[in-house]
Image (cartoon, rainbow, N blue to C red):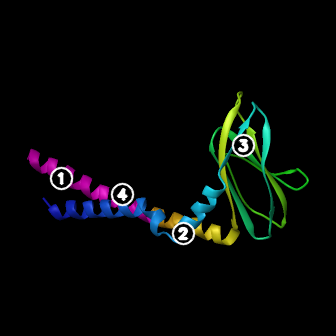
Amino acid sequence: MNLNLLVVGLVFLVIGSSLYVSLPLYYPGYSSVNNVYKSNQGYVIVGPDQSVVVKNFTAQSGQAIIFLVLKGNANVSLLSSTGKPILNQQKEVSIELNQSRYEIEIINLDNQTSNISFTYGLFNARTISNFYYSLGILQTFLDVVVLAGVAMILWYVISWFVTRKK
């Protein structure tokens, strides 16, 4: 039986898991993006099948809004300065904006009054797109490292059981 396989598998599993869990500590820009979301958290109480405008803002060309419903069953609508819906999605809105005034509206989808919590951030569109794209690549790589470690450990355990029965 190859004990090296177990050791390498454990190393992959521990290092991959550690790097994955500690992403917020070392990934460039993670803390600043997280601070934007933290500083823009809020909640609103919305009646059944009602809507409430929770944010009015002016965006510059090249900015993007990311709006997330953290708790509650709600749709999010991005409204133009004339009140026309630009985008209506469940739980989140993420879109690059032109220079204009906008409103964010939360629509309660439940048949009862709900306390809906949310957060949002207004970012440079190119910067935030690159941030999430490269973060996704890094997370995928770390997933592969962790899974490779698990596969090596499982192979070792299965091999151990098979050789023990002989």
Number of the front mark, 4 or 3: 3
x, y percent for residue 29: 56, 70
Spot the residue most to the left: 166
Answer with left or right where residue 117 lies relative to residue 13.
Answer: right
- Highlighted range, magenta: 141-166
Residue identifier under label 1? 159
Q: In terms of sequence position, does the residue under pointer 4 or pointer 2 come before the other?
A: 2
Q: In terms of sequence position, does the residue under pointer 1 or pointer 3 come before the other?
A: 3
The front one of 94 and 118 is: 118
Q: Residues within 10 Å of mark 3 (few under 14, many from 20)?
A: some
Q: Residue at x 88, y 50 (%)?
A: 83
Circle 4/circle 3 CB separation < 8 Å: no
Q: Relative to residue 113, is residue 54 depicted above or below?
A: below
Q: Quadrant of residue 11?
A: bottom left
Residue identifier under label 4? 147
Q: Which quarter of the rendered picture does the N terminus lie within?
A: bottom left
Q: Quadrant of residue 120?
A: bottom right
* Magenta stretch contains residue 154: yes
| Structural distance between the alpha carbons of marks 2 and 3 | 28 Å
